């Protein structure tokens, strides 16, 4: 409709359009004639009074506020993510980190303490409500169990009356003793990798001995479910298992109670590099059916770049001073750049241990801070721009190299799923107009004059 004002008319069927104004927080369906009339009004060319009134009612004529923020100055993070180890007890066929293929590295307590001390000091100085300690990395954090438990105990003791929120991402192959500890201590929740149907999961997520791991992960989820524990599930879909996705989602939601289920096509990184691409039309079709199944259980599936209701110029913490420590203690902004051996380590690593905590390469950090979606020419004119915020920068480097971002098949997936989310929200708002974050009310836009 008018790309300069970020108001878009997205073609549907039978000359119908989805009108989406992300910066105005509005979406509705309209016929071709109404879209043309609205375009004239929004462009300042005048128009029928009823159309002008509609544009005002839909808040299309106000000045939108761009959702652009950018960090400045020396970083002062109040959360740390510890990449405890590159070792893993699984050998997943699509592991982006190829965990287990190279000699494992392990973080020391001194490295963990330095990072924890730094964020707790920042949190106290800035009056933050809590300090965050997260566990992630290119391996399975729970494999380095003693450091995981001892570092969190240290953080809570060091914080005193300052609250510590701890969370982790893991593969779910835990002992009951570990599960007990997680329920009692990881108050920020746990994200588990589980691919749904046991035959789908076991084919791609075997243990180090080559046996299936689904029974172990389901035991963990059952324990979490019984305890009312806050956890999420991440489902990774390979090309050959796309047809199984709807059944996998139904399998998960009919047996367990995750707070969130995220679905992503397998990335062509690490062990999966060069394999069949799952970022296809078939994935979109299967995702839609899986979403229909999920809705029966009161769930909306999550796809990381399709985020209606979120307006931002940042996809993730890479552009927001993410503070992650490699096993050797250097600072990375990216969960996927967990090691100095990563091919894009020079892009994402921006700090090292130094006097007073850390020494930061401000040129490297400011380059990362400047990677907001507003600086990506390819994204201009895309209706999903402020929802996906340019998607994952590490994956764009892997896809396009170090040149200017030129898009990928994920862009098409994102646009289709954002469109689906908008249509769902319009339907839930009575089929008329959806306003983001506002009280839903009817809006008469489907009269005879809309043809």
Image: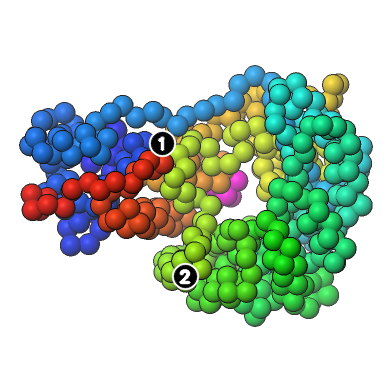
- Measured as percent of width and height from the top left, residue 173 is found at 79, 67
SS class of the residue under badge 2? loop
Q: Position of residue 387 (x, y in %)?
A: 45, 44
User: Crowding near pointer 2: few (<14 within 10 Å), some, many (20+)?
Assistant: few
Magenta highlight range: 394-398
Residue drawn at the location 71% of the way across and 48% of the way down: 188
Can residue 405 be seen in the rendering of this structure?
A: no
Q: Which mark is residue 89?
A: none
Q: Which SS class for mark 1?
A: helix
Residue positioned 75% across, 21% down in the render: 125
Of 25 and 224, nearer the camera is: 224
What predominant SS class does the magenta segment belong to? helix
In the drawing, does residue 448 fall left or right of residue 272? left
- Asked where in the image residue 171 lies, by quadrant, the reply is bottom right
Viewer-nearest of discs 2 and 1: 2
Between residue 2 and residue 277, name the one nearer to us: 2
Q: How is the image coloured?
A: rainbow
In the picture of the structure, the residue carrying the numbered disc 2 is 296
* 2 or 1: tag closer to the N-terminus: 2
- Tell me if residue 254 can be seen: yes
Residue found at the far bottom of this picture: 199
Image-quadrant location for residue 317: top right
Q: Quadrant of residue 144?
A: bottom right
Q: What residue sits 25% from the left and 58% below the top?
A: 12
Number of the label disc, if any, that sits on residue 377 = 1
């Amino acid at each position: 409709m008018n790309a300069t004002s970020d108001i878009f008319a997205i073609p549907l069927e039978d000359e119908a359009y989805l009108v989406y104004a992300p910066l105005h927080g509005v979406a509705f369906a309209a016929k071709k004639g109404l879209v043309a009339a609205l375009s004239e009004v929004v462009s300042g060319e005048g128009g029928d009074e009823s159309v002008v009134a509609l544009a005002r009612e839909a808040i299309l004529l106000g000045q939108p506020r761009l959702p652009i923020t950018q960090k400045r100055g020396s970083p002062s993070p109040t959360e740390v993510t510890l990449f405890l180890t590159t070792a893993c007890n699984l050998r997943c066929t699509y592991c982006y980190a190829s965990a287990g293929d190279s000699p494992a590295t392990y973080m020391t307590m001194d490295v963990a303490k330095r990072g924890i001390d730094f964020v707790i000091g920042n949190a106290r100085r800035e009056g933050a409500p809590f300090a965050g300690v997260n566990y992630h990395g290119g391996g399975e954090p729970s494999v380095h169990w003693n450091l995981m438990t001892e570092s969190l105990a240290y953080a809570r003791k060091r914080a005193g009356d300052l609250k510590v929120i701890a969370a982790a991402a893991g593969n779910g192959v835990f002992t009951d003793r570990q599960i007990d500890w997680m329920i009692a201590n990881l108050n920020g929740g746990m994200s588990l990798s589980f691919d749904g149907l046991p035959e789908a999961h076991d084919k791609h997520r075997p243990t180090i001995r080559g046996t299936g791991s689904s029974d172990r992960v389901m035991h963990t989820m059952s324990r979490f479910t019984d305890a009312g524990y806050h956890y999420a599930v991440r489902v990774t879909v390979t090309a050959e298992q796309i047809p199984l996705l709807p059944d996998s989602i139904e399998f998960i939601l009919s047996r367990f109670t995750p707070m969130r289920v995220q679905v992503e096509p397998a990335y062509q990184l690490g062990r999966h590099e060069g394999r069949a691409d799952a970022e296809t039309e078939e994935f979109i079709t299967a995702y839609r059916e899986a979403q229909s199944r999920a809705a029966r259980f009161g769930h909306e599936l999550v796809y990381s770049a399709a985020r209606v209701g979120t307006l931002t110029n940042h996809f993730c913490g890479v552009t927001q001073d993410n503070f992650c420590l490699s096993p050797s203690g250097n600072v990375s902004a990216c969960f996927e750049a967990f090691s100095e051996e990563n091919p894009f380590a020079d892009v994402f690593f921006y700090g090292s241990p130094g006097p007073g905590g850390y020494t930061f390469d401000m040129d490297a950090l400011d380059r990362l801070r400047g990677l907001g979606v507003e600086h990506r020419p390819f994204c201009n004119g895309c209706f999903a721009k402020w929802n996906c915020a340019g998607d994952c920068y590490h994956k764009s480097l892997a896809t396009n190299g170090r040149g200017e971002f030129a898009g990928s098949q994920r862009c098409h997936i994102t646009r289709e799923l954002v469109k689906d989310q908008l249509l769902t929200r319009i339907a839930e708002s009575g089929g008329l107009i959806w306003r983001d974050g506002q009280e839903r009310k009817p809006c008469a836009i489907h009269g005879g004059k809309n043809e």
